[in-house]
Image (spheres, rainbow, N blue to C red):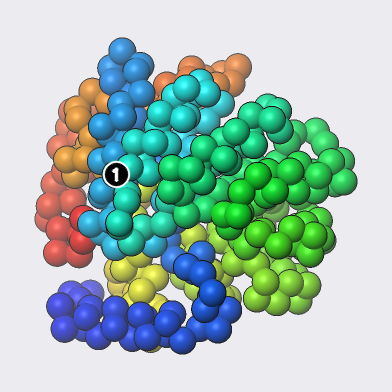
Amino acid sequence: MRVLDRRTFLKASTALAATLASAPAFAAERALRGIFPIAWSPCTPDNVLDLDAMAAQTAFCNRGGVAGLAWPQNASGWMALSEKERLDGAEAMLSAGQGGKTQLMIGVQSHDVGTSVRFARHAARHGADAIISLPPEGKSDDEVIAYYKTIAAATDLPLMAQAVGNMSVELIVRMAEQIPTLKGVKDEAGDPLARFADFKRRAGDRLAIFSGGGGRTLLEEMHLGFAGSCPFIGIADLYQETFDLWQSGHRKDAFDLFGRTAAFNSIPGANAYAMVARGVFREGTIYRQNPSKDRANTLPAAPADNEQKAFIRETLADTLKAYLRA
């Protein structure tokens, strides 16, 4: 596997910047394009939301040249966060990101639309670049459209819908036709790869289509023309570098680098522990997760096995260090 040298990377970055600068679809506003990882909700060992760590992961993305960062969504355990924690966490994240290049997207979904509106307005007041929301559960298509219309009316910020469950392409395109600020979709309803052609046929370039799924199908997504991806945050800088290389025509280098990220992600516990191993979070950090009948609402950030921790750290140092931006 050929190691990507600095000259090649700089050429790739310059070419990508020129491409984005000339792209007519994004001329009027910052593009929803690139890697937008979902931030963790890091907590102290006694389960208090760690606002310093919230700020640290924002700074991490800015150092790594990551296009965006979204919080809180499902991977953030949003249902296990109080309203105060969500407001405090958003403020910590947005304050740390002021003046940075990473676009900060605040999740505003809740169990009632009034609370979602408060979250949206709070995000706008504190400098968010965009908002994102899951749909309300168990509602008809017309009720889902009404929900998104209501939160969109609360602010002028670009809105991304997170498509889950039975949200059809037709429904999302109808939403885009009625909601001018709806600019993107994080598609996790069905098979995003199979749905992409239908999105393009129905919406053209009106919607920036992102995927979730931990970035596992990033190469195929870029081949098809997805606007970006929302993987885990721990090696988001490597995902962004892969994206930049591909978009600037260095596809073999992108393939090789993606192979390294895929190998890292195959290590049990690597995604959760990466932020600790890279010095962004402290040892002992735990993460909130959405509660369910078969799991608690916290997740250890570290594998239980100290040998596994050591292996993750060694892998970062021995095989990925030359590529890490952050």
Q: For this rendering, which residue is in front, 8 or 134?
A: 134
232 lies above or below 203: above
Residue ID for mark 1: 96
Q: Classify residue 2 by image quadrant.
A: bottom left
Q: Is residue 2 left or right of residue 15?
A: left
Q: Amino acid at mark 1?
A: Ala
> Is 113 above or below relative to 193?
above
Neighbourhood count class around disc 1 (C-alpha, 10 Å): few under 14, some 14–19, many 20 upward: some
Q: Confirm whether residue 55 shows in the render.
A: yes
Tell me residue 180's x, y (percent): 71, 62
- For the point 12% across and 52% down, the residue is 317
Identify the residue at horizontal 33%, vertical 42% (top origin). 95
Which quadrant holds the C terminus? bottom left
231 and 109: which one is in front?
A: 109
Whether 55 is drawn above or below 97: the answer is: above
Q: Is residue 36 left or right of residue 100?
A: right
Q: Residue at x 31, y 29 (%)?
A: 51
Q: Position of residue 44 (x, y in %)?
A: 28, 20
Image coordinates for residue 308, horizontal then vertical, percent: 22, 35
Q: Look at 25% across and 41% down and name the residue there.
A: 56
The quarter of the rendered structure image containing the N terminus is bottom left
Residue 255: x %, y % from top left: 36, 74
Is 46 or 182 nearer to us in this picture? 182
Q: Secondary structure at mark 1?
A: helix
